[in-house]
Amino acid sequence: MKQSRVKEIWKKGGVAIGTLVKSTDPVHTEVLSQSGLDFLWYDLEHADKSVETFANLARASRVGDVDILARPGRWEYMRMGRLLEAGALGILYPRCESADEAREVVRWSKFYPAGERGFDGGSPDNNYGQYQAGDYTNRANEDTWVTTQIESPKALVNVSEIAAVEGVDCVFFGPGDYSALIGRPGDVKGDETLKAARIIAEQTIAEGKVFGTLAFDMDHAKHMKDLGAQLIVHGADIVFYKKAYEELVEAYRDWA
């Protein structure tokens, strides 16, 4: 069973850095898993990935030393179990609006006595049945990290209650949806969005939990770190690839 790199970083008071992986090619996952990043995020809420595709990507990540963070769609509690069985150590649950909803996320992400996650000891996260049932469930509960995502003004008023839920490890601010829901789509670094990030950070940390969010450049990342972020998703593979090749093409244009 894999020990969580991210949770070890948090125990030491550090910041875990990851990126969004949109590519469905396992080669990209293999490369990124050896890059020094702490985790790789796979989004199954918006993207075209199936659980089967995700399982192959998670398998490819084992060549390196990274945690896998997976985001299901909202209310997809049974799917969360399959993502964990396939190798995810972190669950990023979107659009969490209340403490009751957060409790359901924990219920389906953790084995008894912390929750009621379904048992399949022959899955990849248990090295295909290598460990005894009790050892497997205890270690899974210890190393799985549950992240609830705040993405709406409605959820903003419930941050303290959501963060206080036992079993929630991290509260994550989603500036994309938040900016859209306040009528300012894409204004991820605007004053109102940054104010929401500060409120979420303060209330989450006050409950003794980890604050996480996205970063869009190094100045923005530094601001989030100053707010107390210990989980930062910086950019996406496709964005970095595109930018690198655009810069290459531009360099050749200078020859003309």
Image: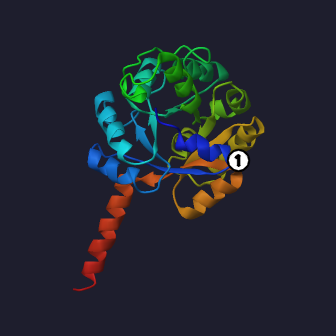
Q: Is residue 183 visible?
A: no
Closest to the observer, 40 or 164: 40
The residue that appears at 31% across and 68% down in the rendered structure is: 246
Q: How many marks?
A: 1
Closest to the observer, 203 or 230: 230
Q: Is residue 82 left or right of residue 222?
A: left
The residue that appears at 33% across and 37% down in the rendered structure is: 59
In the rendered view, tell whether residue 158 sits above or below residue 10. above
* Image x and y of residue 209, in percent: 69, 37
Please, what secondary structure does the residue beneath circle 1 have? helix
Q: Which residue is mark 1?
A: 198
Amino acid under disc 1: Arg
Q: Is residue 138 visible?
A: yes
Judging from the image, the colouring scheme is rainbow
* Image x and y of residue 203, in percent: 74, 38
**Residue 44 falls in image quadrant:** top left
* Image x and y of residue 36, in percent: 46, 56
* Image x and y of residue 148, in percent: 58, 32
Q: Which residue is most to the bottom?
A: 255
Q: Which residue is most to the right?
A: 206
**Residue 124 falls in image quadrant:** top left
The residue that appears at 67% across and 28% down in the rendered structure is: 162
Q: Quadrant of the C terminus?
A: bottom left
Mark 1, residues whose alpha carbon is within 10 Å: few (<14), some, or many (≥20)? some
Q: Is residue 148 left or right of residue 84?
A: right
